[in-house]
Image (cartoon, grey):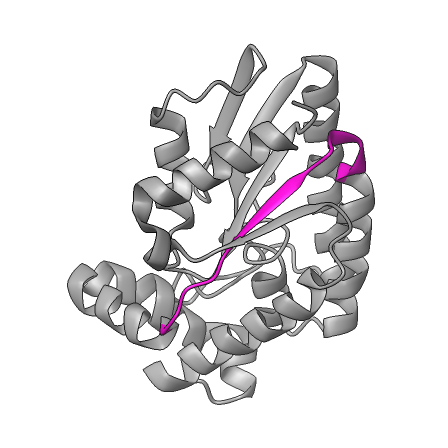
Amino acid sequence: MKTRLILIEGLPGAGRTTTVDGLKSAGIDWCTSKVEFYNQYDNPLNAFWTWGDGAVENEVIEEPYGSAKFTVRILERTYRLVNRILSQDLCVVMEGYPFQLVIRNMLKMLGTEDDCRAYYRRFVDAISYCSPHLFYLQHPNWRERIARIAESRGEAFRAIFFTAMTRTPYGREHGVDTDTKVIDFYESCYRFGLSLLDTWPFDLTRLDPIALGRQGTLDAIAKAVAEA
């Protein structure tokens, strides 16, 4: 297997974390002695809940910084990860990159699409040494699904997904003060991400986790990686 970096992407609620956790427990032969699995909460690139994204009410940003510095910090972590992968013969499986956990946050902080494109180009260049494979989970009827998730998970989820968004610079400037407007924002991020996905230069597999089911999704990823 040549692949040393497996990226699991898709909108919130599409099944990214479930898929990473499933791969971790599946006992798949990854053809390498060392495999590390990261979901969005323990990711070594760590672009989640940073840069004053509204997660904390009345947050005071002690060191405000714009898209350029944000990009530099993410790329510093990316190169450290690439170095570990290559020097230790690792295979790393992780979710939320290159789209959800950086581009989403960058746009929430009033970064521009050009800022996002600049980050994306540099990220792609940085990971090229790892023969990455991107699996994009495309969820049908996403709006309905995220509404069901919000209803089932209660106030903790609402605080993270909806309320925090209203406190971000984007949310304040654009009057994002309803659930519908929050979901509209996420869908706009999704559409922009798909435009970048069309330029992805490495292995890419698009999956429908609803049609495939949990085990079918895991099997499809294992098969694609084995055949790469």
Q: Quadrant of residue 161?
A: bottom left
Q: Quadrant of residue 58?
A: bottom left
Relative to 110, is 180 above or below?
below
Point 54% across, 88% down: residue = 174
Q: In which quarter of the image is residue 41?
A: top left
In the displayed orientation, state which residue is furthest to the bottom.
175
Using residue 201 as the reference point, say whether residue 25 is left or right of it. left
Point 58% across, 32% down: residue = 225
Is 45 in front, or is 175?
Answer: 45
Query: Can residue 159 be seen at all in this image of the molecule?
Result: yes
x and y, in percent, of residue 182 in the image = 42, 78
Is 161 in front, or is 136?
Answer: 136
Query: Can residue 178 be seen at all in this image of the molecule?
Result: no
x and y, in percent, of residue 81 in the image = 68, 29
Quadrant of the frame with the C terminus: top right
Q: How many marks can you see? A: 0
Using residue 179 as the reference point, say whether residue 87 is left or right of it. right
Quadrant of the frame with the N terminus: top right
Point 46% across, 41% down: residue = 220
In the displayed orientation, state which residue is furthest to the top.
33
x and y, in percent, of residue 62 in the image = 59, 55
Point 38% across, 20% down: residue = 27
Within the magenta stretch, is there residue 129?
yes
x and y, in percent, of residue 223 in the image = 51, 34
Relative to 114, is 21 above or below?
above
Is 219 in front, or is 21?
Answer: 219
Within the magenta stretch, is there residue 162?
no
User: What segment is highlighted magenta in the picture?
Assistant: 127-141
